Image: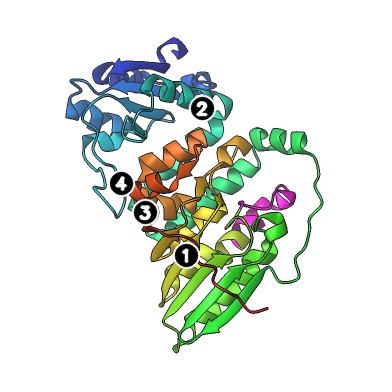
Amino acid sequence: MTATLGAQPLPAATALDLVRSLQPADLADLFPAPILCVDLADAHPDDLTALAARRPPLLLVGVGPGADSGTGRHGDPGRGAEGALDVLLPEVLRPGDDVPAAVAALDRAVADHPEAAVALVGLLRMTPRLEPLDGLVAESLAYSTLLAGGDFARWLAARGPRPHRDADRPLLRRRDGDRLVLTFNRPEARNAFDTFTRDALVAALREASADATLTEVVLTANGPSFGAGGDLSQFGTAGDLARAHLVRTGASAGAEIIRCPHRVVAHLHGACVGAGIEIPAFADRVVAAPDVAIQLPELALGLVPGAGGTVSVTRRIGRRRTAWLVLTGTFLDAPTALRWGLIDAIEELRQVPASP
């Protein structure tokens, strides 16, 4: 069984026969190589549609011509026969990127983190069919599940304990007429997103939503980076993962942006990693400086995005490009992010002053 799985593309009919033949006892054999590549040359749409209907616990990669755009609100949602596939090549690549090298990168990612990879693609398959708030619940359930997994435990043991550095004011507020400017203010930690920052942001967004005199909320950041992602010093500190899920969904910055009746604008610069892109991607408008560097690195920890990225990023660029970013940990530059629709404009950073 495992000899037929892997990075070698198979004809669509052969891939479908393989998936149909899977038995419960075979599932353990799918690991450590839960990837199936499909050659799209001469692939019959009925075979691809039937493949989608099986929902196999595999990363399904389509290789070859005929890929549609597969984007979110900025393009075709990709619901045709090729909607069966989790990643399409060369669709997700930049001009000049090598398709065989991309397949090899996906193969390595799945081999290194099989449980997280399969959880990711299963989550992304359902996310476009869910309301955004429901998608956040699904993401949190998957995230808590993986926090209990062996892959994350190994990463945590290798990293070792880290001290947490508190900030007196992790989020600054400034009222500017009918605008509220919210500025992340942990520059010494590259604005790593910790629980204190989350709670301050959620509280500020809730207050903003209740203020009928506001028309716009602006998200910006002090220091060289908009956000370096979740604060690693707090990873693995939740003792009760069921309760952690309830906290994560009950105090979600992404959910508050979705609910906010005012226009939300995010100004990005520097590193926008993990939560540093997942949260601002919920905004109505995302403006990035030319130096922006975007990454979703959670798979390397044995996790999926946990700050709303499977919803926010997918809504902007589609699930297949989101899968590619998470599975490979690829950095996305500003021109590519603009072309894909992850950001709406590239502008030189103009520092938005916050209250002292």
Question: Which quadrant of the figure contains the N terminus?
Answer: top left
The CA span between labels 4 and 1 is 21 Å
**Which residue, given by chain and number where applicable, does mark 4 sit on?**
71
Res. 100 visible in picture: yes
**Which residue, given by chain and number where applicable, does mark 2 sit on?**
110
Q: Earlier in the sequence, mark 4 or mark 2?
A: 4
Residue at position x 36%, y 23% in the image: 99
The range drawn in magenta is 228-246
Look at label 2 and name its amino acid: Val
Res. 238 visible in picture: no
Q: Secondary structure at mark 1?
A: strand
**Which residue, given by chain and number where applicable, does mark 3 sit on?**
315
Q: Earlier in the sequence, mark 1 or mark 3?
A: 1
Residue at position x 70%, y 55% in the image: 189
Q: Is residue 293 magenta?
A: no
Look at label 1 and name its amino acid: Ala
